[in-house]
Image (cartoon, rainbow, N blue to C red):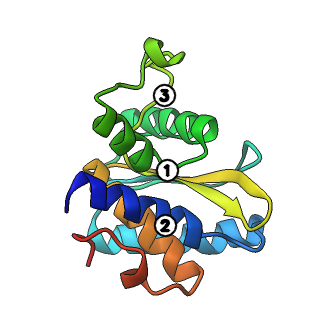
Amino acid sequence: MSLDDDLVRLKLQEQLLQFTKFDESDAWELGSAMREAALERKHPFVIDIRCAGRKLFFAALPGSAPENESWVQRKINATQRFHQSTYHIGRVLEKRGLKLDENMGVAAIEMAAAGGCFPIIIKNVGVVGTITVSGIPQREDHNFVVEAVAAHLNIPLASVALSDCQ
């Protein structure tokens, strides 16, 4: 898939994968489903779900490392700043030939534009939190989160998936 095709699809994901509400029960249900899917696939993930800065779900799975938790925080910081998925941020920067660094007014050590963090968007409200994973290559991290959110919202994955997501 081309960079331009990805950008169109990433924007579509953020438009369609919106919640009507999101609370502790939603975080537990979504996080638990993500954990089970990650265990089945043997993904060495850290999974983190936050709303209004409050950690509602966290899991560190076999094979994950402390570095994964650091990546999660850096991805969360980027999504909170730009209100987009980190994969979307990274692809936009790639298209523009830019990096997420001091030239953009951020410390590179504090933010990461690597896939794996998706904003929790409430319809007619906006971004209220984040759903984040770290542990496998960034496009796969992103696809995993999108798959989980689409399933939780009963949205067919084919309508939002990037071309290489099955």
> N-terminal of the two: label 1 or label 3?
1
**Residue 88 percent coordinates (x, y):** 42, 49
Q: Nearer the viewer, residue 117 or 25?
A: 117
Is 18 situated above or below 74? Answer: below
Q: Is residue 97 left or right of residue 72?
A: left
Q: Earlier in the sequence, mark 2 or mark 1?
A: 2
Label 1 packing within 10 angstroms: few (<14), some (14-19), many (20+): many
Q: Which residue is mark 3?
A: 111
Task: Give yes or no for contact between labels 2 and 1 (Cβ–Cβ under 8 Å).
Answer: yes
Q: Secondary structure at mark 2?
A: helix
Q: Secondary structure at mark 1?
A: loop
Q: Is residue 129 above or below residue 106?
A: below
The outermost residue toward the top is: 102
Residue at the spot x=70%, y=52% of the render? Answer: 127
Tag nearer the camera, 1 or 3: 1
Real-space CA distance between mark 2 and mark 1, rounded to the nearest whole angstrom: 9 Å
The dot on residue 85 is 1
Report crowding for label 2: few under 14, some 14 to 19, many 20 or more residues within 10 A (C-alpha): many
Name the kind of residue labelled 3 in the image: Met
Q: Residue 126 at what x, y percent from top left?
A: 73, 56
Residue 149 falls left or right of residue 42: right
The mark that comes first in sequence, 3 or 2, is 2
Give the number of the mark in front: 3 or 2.
2
Q: Is residue 49 visible?
A: no
